[in-house]
Image (cartoon, rainbow, N blue to C red):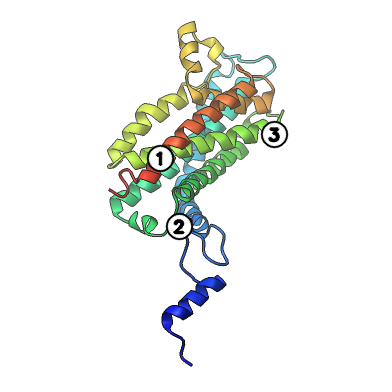
Amino acid sequence: MKIPHDVSQGAAGARGDDPIAEPGGSLPGGVLIGFRTLLYKEVLRFWKVSFQTVAAPVLTAILYLLIFGHVLEDRVKVYDQITYTAFLVPGLVMMSVLQNAFANSSSSLIQSKITGNLVFVLLPPLSHWEMFGAYVGAAVVRGLAVGLGVLLVTVWFADLHVFNVGWILAFALLGAAMLGTLGLIAGIWAEKFDQLAAFQNFLIMPATFLSGVFYSIHSLPPFWQAVSHANPFFYMIDGFRYGFFGVSDVSPVVSFGLVAAAFAVVATIALRLLRSGFKLRH
């Protein structure tokens, strides 16, 4: 006997064989397949041009180390029994992590918006959580890849020891996630490349360079010390550096708490923008 089409479809749905994706982006036989696919796409996007996205930032960090290390090695003393070059290496590693995490998510979104292929990300049933996790996750991967490359190359220039690997990983992961989230916000907000460049040049770059990468804030006048304490980038780099030397300008527990709070704020903003479709769906 021939079974009516609607009855057969209902039976298939009851057995759980319906191939239609749920709003969360998962299919039968796959968990969060939308998230995993977008994450893979974003990682592959920067890895395909790794000479530009990974090797070039490593070279830039080496140049910073050679120039500042050579000029200031005998003139700047930050901590007792720690050379200036050794002090500089963790700062350069973390600076590379932060800048490249921001660049990955922001450049991906703005390129997709301008070229018009963002529609292929918006059409699938991806939740705002999955989009957030994929873009930020890929940014963290790129940031850590560049940071590891910088560390492997620059560690030969200084006598560097690891005091607490847990703090190193914690600040590297949290810092990369926060800058990846900021990049996501910038990519959503910007409609042209020059708007994204303004966001990076007037916010990200100054905050990074004024965060104690090349100096300890105790060498600054009181006013600029207070300004530095208002910069969340300072706590990321100071806490990351603590993992190597066991000394820092601020307690790593305090630094981690402040960075985590800042990440919670920017993550909430990014999720609200993704959920509303601000400058993405409208």
Q: Earlier in the sequence, mark 2 or mark 1?
A: 2
- How busy is the neighbourhood of tag 2: few (under 14 within 10 Å), some, or many (20 plus)? few
- Quarter holding residue 242: top right
CA gap between label 3 and label 1 equals 34 Å
73 vs 50, nearest the viewer:
50
What residue is rendered at 56% in x and 44% in y? Answer: 145
Q: Is residue 85 visible?
A: no
Taking the spot 67% from the left edge, 19% from the top edge, the residue there is 247
Secondary element under disc 3, as helix, strand or loop, is: helix
Label 1: how many Cα within 10 Å (few below 14, some 14–19, many 20+):
some
* Residue 34 in the image, given as x and y percentages of width and height: 48, 58
Residue labelled with disc 2 = 23
Q: Which residue is mark 1?
A: 272
Horizontal relation, residue 240 to residue 124: left or right:
right
Give the amino acid type for the residue marked by disc 1 in the picture.
Answer: Arg
In the rendered image, the vertical position of residue 195 relative to residue 223, given as above or below: below
